[in-house]
Amino acid sequence: MLDGQLSLDSLLTALPDAALVLDASADAAIGWNDAADALLDLSGTGGRAVSGHFGAALPHFIVFLEEVDHRGAAWTRDIELPGAPRCEIRGRPLPDAPGLFLIVLHDLREIDRHAQISEAADLHRAGVGEWKRAQHFFAELERQNQLILNAAGEGIYGVNADGKTTFVNRAAQEMLGWTSEDLLGRDMHALIHHHHLNGDVYHAQDCPIYRAFRFEQVHRIEDEVFWRKDGRPIRVEYVSTPIYDHKVLAGAVIIFRDITERKENERRLHDAMQEVADLRDRLEQENAYLQEAISSERAHHDILGQSPQIRQLLQKIDLVARTDATVMITGEPGTGKALVATAIHKDSHRSRRPLIHFKCGSVAPDAVDAELFGQMRGAYPGALRDRPGKLELAHGGTLFIEDIEELPLDSQGRLLHALQNGAVTRLGDTRAREVDLRVIASSSAPLDDAVRRGRLRADLHFFLDVFPIACAPLRARPEDIPALSDHLLRLACKRINRDPPIITEGTMQQLSAYHWPGNVRELRNVIERGAILSTRGKLVVELGHGAGGSAPGPVEVRTEAEMQQALRDNVVAALREAGGKVSGPGGAAARLGLRPTTLYSRLRALGIDREEWHAPG
């Protein structure tokens, strides 16, 4: 038995792989070599059964032994030994020794290494030429791939699963200003994608490129920012796609293009379209304003008169019109302050642009800012569209602010700020728009008194009161009344389509002697009323109580219904005098200075029947 044991030990020692002799009936190893001892620690088991080395794989090992016993030899790679490398296990029974098996364990790592050595040996045996051909093949393949990547107009770069750069094509290097040496092996996000355009930090976990290889998602981004090496941003659009190596996620490839120029062109186009829209809004507002100005009675005549006050006024207009100085016009209501503003604008270099009129007292306090500064859609309930204010409409022209003391104090402060800075910000907007305009303001109240009573800001008063012009009341220049009366009478008769009656000397003396608390505006109303009431070719005026004297007296104010009744009574009286005859010589139309067709239309409009002019007087 000793000789047999020595023969067995010699056999096991001679084997290059781990080997042992297993006594299946005793579940014990009766011999093993050093390799098996290193693999299974057989000498340190203290008599532990061999089956204890197989753990959960023991059932597979028992089946394997039965196959060895039945077939005479067998092998398997399906049995994994706990704590040991993966092995190929071979077994065969010992001859003339029932129950004894030779078990050989081959380390699969060694088998793979041997296969690689064999392949290398085969290649070596094939000669240097074959090796060079293989090297050339792979070099050519890499060169073609690089040519394709570098020929692409888009920037292309790749990152591995750690976010480190693996390749960068030439277009990417040129767009970013980085070289491949700068980028390869480094965190691409930290170099080119670290901040948003507004300066906020761009965290890697929020980056779609990182999400591409972390969550295996394709991301198409149409507008983001990459940062060049020189610190300048470029606007980019890109596609980030995950890439795989043998079905294992390996990283991502990013294809991007520089859209900075396109975005700049889009911005310029948007600004141009916005400018066109703003200009369109301005033109629409100007057109509406000018149409209103054309139909307004205040601009239908020029400044008339030969009094010293008027001559001095015209001299001041000539002095200031050709400058851009701010003008403050003062005077009682009805003295023609708007006419003075119009005359200054017409004689200025801004006359090609409109004179925009803003009457402070005619706008509700909560709508003043929108009218004066403009609005954006949604700035407040009811703001349904963008609309420029009077300051914008006056750009290049003149803004006439009438009754400045009627402007709310808050709006006065915003107006002063806009005029001092030459810029206006619409309600609901954050963008200031430059304005170039000339300001003419007027007030019917003494300015010092308005400041003292808190109706006018002192700083706005000082800003506007650069060149003061005072309009004298009509009672202070009675020598201008004849020219004004004649002019106003022609305008009134043109509107009511009749020939102007004669202003007798007595009537003119009556007009010149009146106090005129309403100034030229009151004179216009008196003349127009007289043109309607006068039927015998002479102007008849009604100046109220005290007419004809020098003492002032209020003019009797009639309602519209009273004026219509007076007109009706006048037509009926003319028909009675003409005996009911409408047209022809001596007819009612001739007596009224009307065309027959006009009188027929008026009869229908006033509802005058034949019975009325036949009725007893």
Image (cartoon, rainbow, N blue to C red):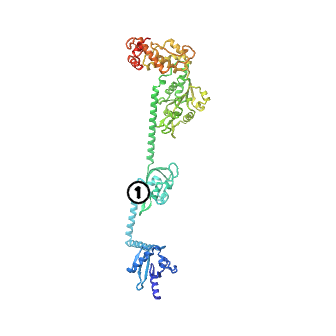
In the rendered view, tell whether residue 398 sits above or below residue 83. Answer: above
Compare residues 426 and 420 and report the one nearer the observer. 426
Looking at the image, how many numbered discs can be counted on the residues? 1
- Residue that extends furthest to the right in the rendered view of this protein: 452
Residue where numbered disc 1 is placed: 149
Compare residues 567 and 300 and report the one nearer the observer. 567
- Across and down, in percent, residue 87 comes to 44, 74
**Residue 487 appears in the rendering:** no
In the rendered view, tell whether residue 183 sits above or below residue 553. Answer: below
In the rendered view, tell whether residue 385 sits above or below residue 448. Answer: below
Dot 1 amino acid type: Leu
- Across and down, in percent, residue 568 comes to 44, 17
Quadrant in which the C terminus is drawn = top left
- Across and down, in percent, residue 292 comes to 46, 28
Q: Which secondary structure, mark 1?
A: helix
Q: Quadrant of residue 246?
A: bottom left
